Amino acid sequence: MPDMTSPKIPQYRMTLFYGPEHDESDSDIVYCVFNVKKRSWKGGVQIAVEIAQTQLLHIRNHFAFEQWLTPFLAHLPEVERKDYLERGQDVFVQQICLAKLQLAIAVGIRQENSRLSKDFLVSELDDALRKGEPAVKEEILRELDIELPA
């Protein structure tokens, strides 16, 4: 009889609640809000994840984001291509915020609604994204329902 192992269930469930949004009090901040639920918690919490516009620009340039995404959209009519590019920008920011949230969870979060400042885990996020760039790009294509390259 073959050994049966059950799949590992993640300790946290993270669901995008809304975003990206621009902070009305600080034009340098973009944020997404996630519902986060740990299996041992009775209920979930909402965590706003801030990213500085300057850091997003740096990451976008490092990823060569538009140059990378544009060829995947070449087969679409121009109007649709523009919509997909705009949606891709939103999904890009959501993925960056999610990566920062995952780093914060690794450091430890409490069961309370909170906000991760734009100044929190900046270099750690940059390092994680350098290593995880292919996975982030793959997830963006998946979210946009674009065929993954072979």
Image (cartoon, grey):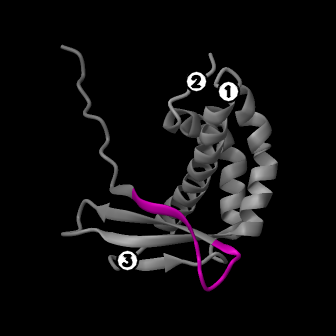
Which of the 4 image quarters holds residue 69?
Answer: top right
Crowd around label 1: few <14 · some 14–19 · many ≥20 (10 Å): some
Give whichever of 91, 86 is nearer the camera.
Answer: 86
Which residue lies at the image location 64% right of the left edge and 49% below the top edge?
89
**Between disc 1 and disc 3, whose residue precedes?**
1
Give whichever of 5, 11 is nearer the camera.
Answer: 11
Give whichever of 120, 63 is nearer the camera.
Answer: 63
Which residue lies at the image location 59% right of the left edge and 77% below the top edge?
23
Give whichever of 23, 8 is nearer the camera.
Answer: 23
User: Three-letter amino acid code at disc 2?
Assistant: Leu
Rendered image: mark on residue 148: 2
Residues in magenta, as a range: 16-29
Name the secondary structure under disc 3. loop
Which of the 4 image quarters holds residue 132?
Answer: top right
Q: Is residue 127 magenta?
A: no
Image marks 1 and 2: residues in contact by CB distance under 8 Å: no
Name the secondary structure under disc 1. helix
Tag 1 residue: 72
Query: At which x and y percent is residue 106?
Result: 49, 63
